[in-house]
Image (cartoon, rainbow, N blue to C red):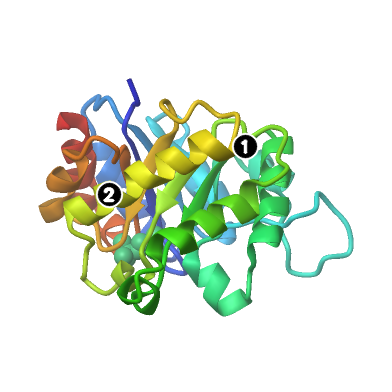
Amino acid sequence: MRKPLVVGNWKMNGSVAFVEKLLAGVIGGMSNQQVDIAVCPTYVQLAQAAAICANSAIAVGGQDCSHVQSGAYTGEVAASMLRDQGCQWVILGHSERRQYHGELSALIGAKLSAVIEAGLRPILCVGETREQRESGDAQTVVAEQLEGSLQGQANLGELVVAYEPVWAIGTGLTASPEQAQEMHAFLRGCLEKLTEVDAGTTRLLYGGSVKGANAAELFSQPDIDGALVGGAALDAEEFLAIINAADSA
Ligand code: PGA
């Protein structure tokens, strides 16, 4: 009942030639998989990626956006501009935004409102650090992140939540399928309590060193509805392997 969703977060990687080659490889390897697919390039690669993906099953998304719709905000990009460039999705609250740009839940919540106002679909990231997990605070941390950004939101649109344990991002360490499932079930319960969204139909993605080799095991868990993929999304074969694992789940 929840269609799998696989999203590639390219982070700050690529070039014109790289984007062309990567997307040609992914599109060329697709075969009508029953999976929603998106790629999130940097802002400057969006128009190129959107043009290449226009007649494919791949949607395009932003990695972040401003919390306001226009004005004197040097260096920022508004959600409406992402939509203008052909985006359907926006990643919000990624741990790298929290860590390197000091983003806190209230700002992420304002961005979420801007995204929904612009008619885009948010992918809200939450996740604990290694220290927080080791001290037994993982659930408290993700619940606070969720609540801090969703509080007071009248409309959540087609919200997607991505659980990305910080200790598993780009490290090669993946949460075990059981650890990920436990947190996803917990998050679904939080959504049920905190929001008006139908938690049973809300898609929850896992992220953190997902690759072709571990995707099927993660997707076999009942509350894991897809993945937010970093490094492996930069390799057409790996990304296709993850899409295929989601299709067979
Ligand atoms: P990774 O990144 O797949 O390279 O661990 C995931 C993410 O940060 O979204």
Find residue 166 and report its horizontal and vertical position in percent: 38, 69
In the rendered structure, the answer to whether residue 68 lies left or right of residue 63 reads right
Question: How far apart are the two marked residues, 1 and 2, measured between alpha carbons?
Answer: 29 Å
Marks 1 and 2: which is nearer the front? 2
On the rendering, which quadrant does ligand 1 occupy? bottom left
x, y (%) of residue 159?
Answer: 54, 37
Going 16% across and 38% down the picture, which residue do you hit?
220
Relative image position of residue 82 (x, y in whole percent): 65, 46
Q: Residue at x 55, y 58 (%)?
A: 145
Q: For mark 1, give the secondary structure.
A: loop
Residue hosting label 2: 182
SS for callout 2? helix
Q: For the point 59% across and 51% down, which residue is it?
A: 147
Q: Amino acid at mark 1?
A: Leu
Q: For this rendering, which residue is in front, 139 or 248?
A: 139
Quadrant the N terminus occupies = top left
Q: Is residue 195 visible?
A: yes
Q: Is residue 94 above or below residue 197?
A: below
- Name the residue at the right extreme: 72
Residue type, label 2 = Glu
Above or below — where is 152 with respect to 64? above
**Residue shown at 66% from the left, 47% from the top:** 112
Q: Which mark is residue 58?
A: none
Between 143 and 105, the one lying in front of the other is 143
Classed neighbour count for the residue bearing mark 1: other residues with Cα under 10 Å, few (<14), some (14–19), many (≥20): many
Residue designated by label 1:
120
